[in-house]
Image: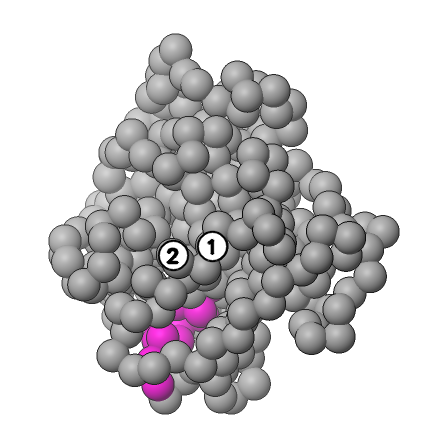
Amino acid sequence: MILSSPNQKINFSTSHILDINSLLKNTRGMLNSLFISKLKSELDTSLDDLLTALLPFASEFSVAPISNFHVGAIAVGSSGNLYFGANLEFTNQALSLVLHGEQSAISNAWLHGETHITKLAINAAPCGYCRQFINELACAHHIEILLNGEVIPFDKFLPMSFGPKDLGNNFGLLTVKDNLQNSEKPDSISSELFQQIGLSYAPYSNNLAACEIQTLDGQVFYGRYAENAAYSPSLSPLQAAISQLILSGNAFSKEVIKQVTLVEMENIENQLSVTKAVLESYDFEVPFNYVLLGNNT
């Protein structure tokens, strides 16, 4: 348990720590604006100092058995809510399958319905992969990065950038668009999973995809496919769903997992191989259900 922050400007009380940890797990990695306002008032601090002090809470969700480098990130939504994220690594699989902390925080905000991110606090400088992922956001050029107590415009991290508009995409990630609004749900999947598929972001391949993780105690976690103009930084729906599971305080283990379901579009599918690779990194056979949607769905 975190007893204090490396940021000497703030020392959380035991009560604060218990409240923060409980709220994060109950909300799958989100602290709402009212709680943040309360914290700022009680601690007599600024938002930036509070974000820096909260980063260790984010990095505690990191699962990094390969690098032992624990990244924590917090996305600030225009709503004032904070969305936490951490890196995830998968043993005995290609390093390219990892989920970066910044991806985790952004996906968390997206899954919570946030449509605009104003700031991203990180405990380590964003790598090139993450800079490209951030650049996919519709609001990318308005985002500030909080790093080591310094606020830096995101554009300074990626000059002369390549992004969605270079491929004729004028929307960008976080833009609300229901791609299956007039489609009929097949009986083989839940209504919530069908909704998540429709909200996925696949402007380059058109392969709408989402993942559902069911736990033995009845919880359900979702992840959406998020493509990137540079292709490689695209986020698989399973990675996003696992991140939600971890942020809730659960482990991806035989004692927790009931079933994983992946749904994507028939004839343009591209997520099965990466999904199987990630599932094979675990030390048990994961019950797996695979559904293809027809293009006339």
Q: Is residue 217 above or below residue 166?
A: below
- Badge 1: how crowded within 10 Å, few (<14), some, or many (20+)? some
Q: Position of residue 153 (x, y in %)?
A: 41, 21
Q: In terms of image quadrants, where is residue 286?
A: bottom left
Q: Secondary structure at mark 2?
A: helix
Q: Is residue 111 above or below residue 187?
A: above
Q: Nearer the viewer, residue 293 or 252?
A: 293
Q: Position of residue 150 (x, y in %)?
A: 31, 27
Q: Is residue 30 above or below residue 164?
A: below
- Badge 2: how crowded within 10 Å, few (<14), some, or many (20+)? some
Q: Secondary structure at mark 1?
A: loop
User: Quick one: which residue is furthest to the left in this view?
Assistant: 67
Q: Amino acid at mark 2?
A: Val
Q: Which mark is residue 37?
A: none
Q: In terms of image quadrants, where is residue 280?
A: bottom left
User: Quick one: which residue is furthest to the front in this view?
Assistant: 267
**Does the segment drawn in magenta span residue 154?**
no
**Does the segment drawn in magenta span residue 247?**
yes
Residue positioned 30% across, 57% down in the render: 88
Instruction: State left or right for residue 30 relative to residue 160.
Output: right
Q: Nearer the viewer, residue 29 or 222?
A: 222
Look at the image and give the residue range highlighted in magenta.
243-254
Instruction: List the residue tagged with mark 1.
Output: 271
Residue positioned 48% across, 22% down in the render: 163
Asked if labels 2 and 1 touch by Cβ distance under 8 angstroms, the answer is: yes
Q: Dividing the image into 4 quarters, which one contains the C terminus? A: bottom right
Q: Position of residue 75 (x, y in %)?
A: 46, 43
Q: Which mark is residue 274?
A: 2
